[in-house]
Amino acid sequence: MNDKKRIVVKVGSNVLTRPDGKLDVTRMSALVDQIAWLRRQDIEVILVSSGAMASGRGELRVDHSLDSVEQRQLYSAVGQVKLVGLYYDLFREFGIHVGQVLTMKENFQPGEQYRNQRACMTVMLENDVLPIVNENDTVSVTELMFTDNDELSGLIAQMMQADTLILLSNIDGIYDGHPDNPTSQIIPSVAPGTDLSQYIKEEKSAFGRGGMHSKYTTASKVQSQGIRVIIANGERENILIDLIERKDETPHTEFVPKTE
């Protein structure tokens, strides 16, 4: 990871959201600082960011009931504007231009939409623009949805032939027992084809659709395509910098890429 690389960083809702469900602007700012540092190391970064729903909930008060689809559409439509606006202001402090990419699952089927999306992100990177990717929640509902942004980030990493996918969660990685059990230890390295399903529970995160099962599934698929995947704690101070400069000392789980 010390040569010129292309990294996809996925930031989950539990990292960007405060306990009250609103957007954590302080942590968002800290992550922007770290991404700016990565770019100064001549590393290309694609950011897959959750947080639109949390941003919308914090912005809008509704005095009548909404069903789950209506909430998703309304809060994400309002929140996505605020979320990207915050990223724009934060990255602007470093002189970094950002561009928004809203996508849907059907855009990853072979064909013109796939090629157009890849071409768009390629020209952004060639012109030093940082892509900020999220699902288009206003139209992606029910069966049209990605499982979560873990799945989306994995598809982006493969589409853009990234060297590394970093999945930032609110725990340090995959443990060989329950994370709250003091005897449990992080599994630091996962070889291709390793089955960790006995350690993974199918439970969703507090504010997002994903969970560790989703990250494990995505990591295994992306690993098989020759891309390194790292699961780490986005709430740790300077986690992205530490994964580059002090990786051996930084808690994480790394899926070693499959080689030919």
Image: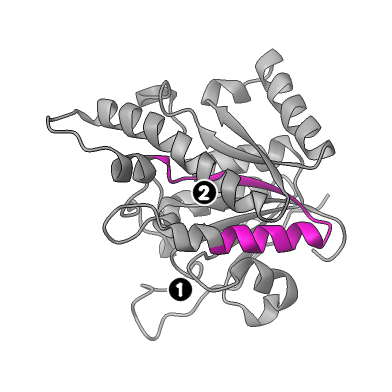
Span shown in magenta = 30-52
Residue 80: x and y, percent?
45, 36
Q: Residue at x 62, y 25 (%)?
A: 108
Residue 138: x and y, percent?
40, 24
Is 212 placed above or below 112 here?
below
* Quadrant in the picture for residue 19: bottom left
In what element is the residue under mark 1?
loop
Residue 51 lies in the magenta-colored region: yes
* Quadrant in the picture for residue 141: top left
Label total for image: 2
* Quadrant in the picture for residue 5: bottom right
Residue 100: x and y, percent?
60, 34
Circle 1 sits on which residue?
176
Q: Amino acid at mark 2?
A: Thr
Between 10 and 191, which is closer to the camera in this rendering? 10
Quadrant occupied by the N terminus: bottom right
Is 249 placed above or below 73 here?
below
Q: Which mark is residue 216?
A: none
Q: Residue furthest right?
A: 3
Q: Is 238 placed left or right of 246 in the picture?
A: left
Circle 2 sits on which residue?
217
Label 2 vs 1, first from the N-terminus: 1
